[in-house]
Amino acid sequence: MFDFKGLIKAIMRKESDDPVGSLKSATIWVQELPHSDIHHALQEILKALDKLNKNQVISLKERSRVLFYLDEKARPLQENLCRDYLAGIDAPTPAPHQKISTILLFWDLMSVAYYNFLRAYAEYPQGKIQPQLPLLTAKALHYHAMQAKWRYLRYLPVEAQTWRHLSRLYSFAESAGFLHTPVNLYPNQPQTTCAQEYLQPMMLHLANPASLLPAQIEMVDLWLDSWSSSLEIEKEFRPHRQLYAINLSDMNPARKLRRNMVGEKYRYWGIGLLLVAINQVTARLKEGELPMRLKLGEECRLPACLNLIEDIAKRWSGESTKRKHVRIASNKPLLVVEGVSSIFSQLQGGKKPLLAETKHNVDLHQHTTPPQEKSDILSASAEPELFKPTLQKWLMRDESAEGLSASFANESGNRLVIGTLLGIKKPGGKHFAVGIVRRISMENSHDIHVGVQIWSQTPLPVELSEIPRDANTLPVAAIYLPESAKLEIGRSLLMPSHAYGQGKQMRIEAQGKSYTIRWQEAVEYSQENTRARFSVVTKDRDAPAVANRIAP
């Protein structure tokens, strides 16, 4: 139940009785807050923090005491709200979350509080405050890093001021001589340093978070709590051992080192020791060590977590950033549908006719796409009927052999996520290509930019059935993706994840033909959909007439 009496007492204080004018008054005030209502209690603390930030009279010593106290009391409340928010952030259509504004305000007010404190100290240094400077600066860096991370979690660009403040705080710690002084941001937490707190948001940026799910961004940030200790930032330019650099005088994040990046304001670091630490972690995981013992967090689930670690290591080493195909600028409208079911329906001409009625042929014994299929896989199909609830209009920005980038206005409020399957039709096209969302960025909550990897320009709708066939069970809609030597993509099937099981045999039916196949390894896997390779066991007799109804 709410502590209404305490809440009323806290709110009805006289304005002259500043609840954060001293540590004593702040302590009494916080004890009167309605802690049974976490959201409301945090909101009240943030109001007090905002008042503290505007208080020009309170001494630096007392300000630091009040700030540390409010930080300590607010932190568990903030962590609770963040856990609640992150639990549903990866859902395609998450429920409206009224607490996100409070979460973001906490990061903003805390970063302002610590930054302004240090700026005030720099103008009027006081010897009594000096022993606290390493902790105060590390906390300021930490909260600015949280501002950056929570922009990434929502696929928004990090504000230039955040990068500028981070670099100024780093410069302050470096010039004051406590850059590598160990501190504990909070009790019972591992020690960190100002250098680690500065490098952590830089490395998160270099992990290309626009192509990660929010839950993955959160995991990578957690791993950096310990991994960042393997990084050493240097003033001296050593291009053969360093990979990244940052200019402390500008408002940009770190980027890959180039030979013209030389000057007093540049700082450099390599990732050799970091990769050694990551390789040790992956080796122990493969030996059967539990992720929690390696400080990988409760959300680390194998094998997906191991795959993510190896992918992030490649990103940091620069192995996964090289483009194989030239991108060509474009400005064309696109028709887009999401999900296997909608793609399947569009490949069937906007309806669900008998699969045997299509005129082109495919032979699963062949590892390459037949010539007639390449020319026009749906030449015999009618123009797809456009379903208003699922069809979207996007604008293509550029394209290459392996993918494209596009933008659209999110008027419906539905939330696109990394890994969403897309059917994409270009102007004048006779069929939908199949691809997957690999990158998302937003200028705001409505203008969305998307990077898409194209898996196949010539997909084929097929049906999957259990062996032996159950007359009471509907077949499953799936999509056959032919091999593409140019894109280095082998033939595979795209299906709902419940239909997949490595080594399992199923019957595939398409165009009046039937095959028995055996699932091989999954190339892409999510809770909803799987793309997997397969081998043909036998070519069966001609398939019976295909039902019009297909299981989703």
Image (cartoon, grey):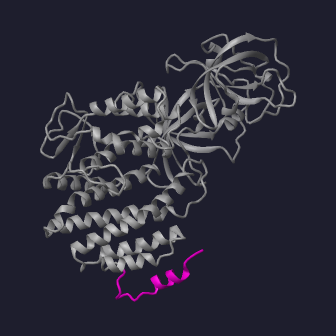
Q: Position of residue 125 (x, y in %)?
A: 13, 68
- Residue name at image x 25 percent, y 78 percent: 58
Q: Position of residue 83 (x, y in %)?
A: 51, 55
Side of 287 relative to 341 (left or right): left
Residue 327 in view of the camera: no
Tell me where residue 480 sits by quadrant: top right
Magenta stretch in the rendered image? 1-19
Whether residue 8 is in magenta: the answer is yes
Tell me where residue 208 sits by quadrant: top left
Whether residue 372 is in magenta: the answer is no
- Residue name at image x 73 percent, y 10 percent: 538
Identify which residue, 80 or 411, lies in the foreground.
80
Q: Position of residue 123 (x, y in %)?
A: 14, 68
Identify which residue, 278 or 512, lies in the foreground.
278
Side of 81 relative to 159 (left or right): right
- Residue name at image x 26 percent, y 49 percent: 193
